[in-house]
Image (spheres, coloured by chain):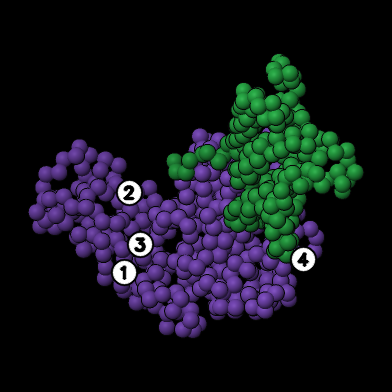
Chain colours: A green, B purple
């Protein structure tokens, strides 16, 4: 589909990749860090405030600063991807730690008592039980990533944000509106997907109490 | 057999959990650790499966020091039941129970078959197997907890206040169930509770612990009730220990008296058999159904004295407690005795029970 002189499909695909890949990557990085913060009070005292502080760095500053730091081309999507990965890690470290904290002590005690080793306990019991809290964190990270991708358009990285920046320059309201509506719709769509995935992975969470 | 040899536990912050505990839980028996909170009963229990590592002394399981070898392996060979069951909320009932067999290396299919067997054994309906733990009542969850501990076929069970979170009626049901299972399985059970009644009801031997894990007395329950060694123990076992001890005294020497009876196969309740006397009304299969008063009116039977119940549930069977209770609760002043099948055997006279009691009183 073409409109306003752009291949919209291409913009949508670029937008989705730039938003989704960093969320998944950020989750993979945040899991061990969050686990560490859950296990060690010392690690938590450093990791949680640090990740909170990371989130306060302006996105545009990061996107511009990363090429200076890593030597990537200024127009590379990697700059946006890395920025969003950092934000996701910043959001999820605390989420992961809190999701693991929320697993009832009776359950972890029972798991240890029946003979789980630490790795089995983490992957067989703690992480599955952390899914509902973790899903909530991922959804926040995902929505935030979908909106932040558009900032990349300011430095020329293609996404639906490009429709906004270019439309603004051309004083073309329909183009700006298409960019905004499109990116909001994508954010909603992926939010629903994360929610559905979380629910599929935790069917027990909706089993009501009582008989 | 579980043997504690001078087991001590000093925590990192300097508090003493256990000073130096020595006791032996015999093979095939229920040994209860009871005491006020802070007496180290849970700590002692957890030294057996190394969830707490003692700072001195050793715990021997079937003669072997548990400190040797891999703790996870050790735990897979010991059943563990925790307060509030500690079921895995994300696994269906059947998979909760199958956890240990799976950890022991069985295929999921074999483990589920084993789990289904054990669920049946603890009296849980097949229909519950596919439920999530959150969909069960507290009592059902606790049964699943027991089933999970049994599924690994371990000869040793550790039970940490397993029934304290359920209401009293369900608690008694679960206790009966445990006694029934134990009669079949003959596990070596170490049971922790703060409830002295539970300790006395379940324990073959009861260890009363003071704060710091110091053993105050270790004895069979009747001895504990009859001869508490000091004020701490007698205070802990409670005021009505004399009455409760009756539950451990056999009433085999009790002479049953003859009572006037009347068969009532047809539900015919006209007039007492013996004018002016209380008469036991029997149904078609010789089971007492009611009292007939001297005026011919029907009265409740009261509790009956079961002379030789083989059902563990009737824990007062054949004891002075059962006999006295029957006599005291009867409207006729004399209790009705039945055999294990509920058939009429005779009457219980309060004076006879008290005379027996007098003779068995500890000197």
Disc 2: which chain?
Answer: B
Give the residue number, with chain letter if any, for mark 3: B322
Disc 1: which chain?
Answer: B
Going by the image, does A99 lie left or right of A42?
left
Q: Nearer the viewer, residue A170 or B113?
A: A170
- Mark 1 and mark 4 in contact? Answer it, CB < 8 Å: no
Q: At x 26% / y 68%, what residue is drawn? A: B350
| Dots 4 and 3 on the same chain | yes
Give the residue number, with chain letter if any, for mark 4: B67
Ranked by sequence position, the earlier of labels 4 and 3 is: 4
Using the numbered discs, state the Cα–Cα distance from disc 2 to disc 4 in whole angstroms: 55 Å
Using the numbered discs, state the Cα–Cα distance from disc 3 to disc 1 in whole angstroms: 10 Å
Using the numbered discs, state the Cα–Cα distance from disc 1 to disc 4 in whole angstroms: 52 Å
Q: Residues within 10 Å of mark 4 (few under 14, many from 20)?
A: some
- Mark 3 and mark 1 in contact? Answer it, CB < 8 Å: no
| Dots 1 and 4 on the same chain | yes
Give the residue number, with chain letter if any, for mark 2: B343
Ranked by sequence position, the earlier of labels 1 and 2 is: 2
Element under label 4? loop
Q: Residues within 10 Å of mark 1 (few under 14, many from 20)?
A: many
| Dots 2 and 4 on the same chain | yes
Using the numbered discs, state the Cα–Cα distance from disc 2 to disc 3 in whole angstroms: 16 Å
- x, y percentage for residue B68? 80, 64
Give the residue number, with chain letter if any, for mark 1: B353
């Amino acid at each position: 589909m073409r409109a306003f002189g752009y291949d919209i499909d291409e913009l949508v695909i670029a937008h989705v990749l730039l938003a989704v890949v960093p969320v998944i990557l950020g989750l993979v990085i945040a899991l061990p860090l969050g686990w560490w913060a859950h296990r060690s009070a010392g690690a938590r005292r450093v990791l949680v405030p640090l990740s909170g502080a990371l989130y306060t760095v302006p996105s545009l500053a990061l996107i511009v600063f990363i090429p200076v730091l890593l030597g990537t081309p200024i127009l590379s999507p990697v700059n946006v991807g890395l920025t969003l990965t950092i934000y996701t890690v910043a959001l999820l470290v605390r989420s992961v730690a809190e999701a693991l904290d929320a697993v009832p002590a009776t359950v972890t005690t029972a798991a240890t008592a029946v003979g789980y080793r630490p790795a089995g306990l983490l992957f067989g019991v703690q992480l599955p039980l952390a899914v509902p809290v973790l899903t909530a964190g991922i959804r926040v990270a995902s929505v935030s990533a979908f909106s932040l991708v558009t900032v990349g358009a300011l430095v020329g990285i293609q996404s639906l944000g490009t429709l906004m920046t270019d439309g603004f320059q051309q004083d073309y309201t329909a183009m700006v509106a298409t960019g905004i509506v499109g990116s909001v719709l994508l954010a909603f769509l992926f939010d629903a997907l994360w929610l559905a995935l979380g629910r599929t992975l935790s069917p027990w969470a909706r089993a009501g109490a009582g008989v | 057999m579980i043997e504690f040899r001078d087991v001590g536990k000093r925590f990192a912050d300097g508090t003493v959990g256990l000073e130096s505990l020595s006791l032996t839980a015999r093979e095939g028996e229920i040994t209860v650790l009871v005491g006020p909170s802070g007496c180290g009963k849970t700590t002692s229990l957890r030294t057996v499966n190394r969830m707490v590592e003692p700072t001195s002394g050793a715990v021997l399981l079937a003669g072997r020091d548990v400190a040797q070898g891999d703790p996870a392996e050790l735990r897979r060979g010991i059943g563990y039941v925790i307060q509030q069951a500690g079921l895995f909320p994300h696994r269906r009932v059947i998979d909760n129970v199958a956890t240990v067999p799976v950890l022991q290396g069985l295929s999921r299919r074999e483990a589920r078959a084993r789990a289904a067997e054990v669920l049946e054994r603890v009296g849980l309906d097949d229909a519950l197997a596919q439920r999530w733990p959150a969909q069960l009542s507290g009592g059902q969850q606790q049964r699943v907890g027991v089933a999970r501990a049994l599924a690994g076929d371990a000869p040793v069970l550790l039970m940490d206040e397993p029934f304290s979170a359920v209401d009293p009626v369900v608690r008694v049901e679960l206790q009966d169930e445990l006694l029934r299972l134990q009669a079949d399985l003959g596990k070596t059970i170490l049971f922790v509770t703060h409830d002295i009644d539970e300790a006395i009801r379940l324990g073959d031997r009861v260890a009363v612990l003071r704060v710091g894990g110091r053993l105050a007395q270790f004895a069979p329950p009747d001895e504990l009730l009859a001869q508490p060694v000091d004020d701490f123990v007698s205070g802990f076992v409670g005021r009505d220990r004399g009455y409760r001890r009756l539950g451990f005294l056999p009433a085999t020497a009790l002479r049953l008296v003859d009572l006037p009876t009347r068969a009532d196969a047809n539900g015919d309740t006209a007039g007492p058999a013996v004018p002016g006397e209380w008469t036991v009304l029997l149904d078609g299969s010789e089971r007492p159904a009611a009292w007939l008063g001297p005026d011919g009116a029907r009265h409740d039977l009261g509790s009956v004295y079961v002379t030789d119940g083989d059902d563990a549930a009737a824990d007062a069977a054949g004891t002075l407690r059962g006999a006295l209770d029957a006599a005291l609760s009867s409207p006729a002043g004399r209790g009705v005795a039945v055999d294990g099948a509920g058939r009429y055997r005779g009457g219980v006279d309060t004076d006879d029970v008290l005379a027996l009691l007098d003779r068995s009183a500890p000197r």
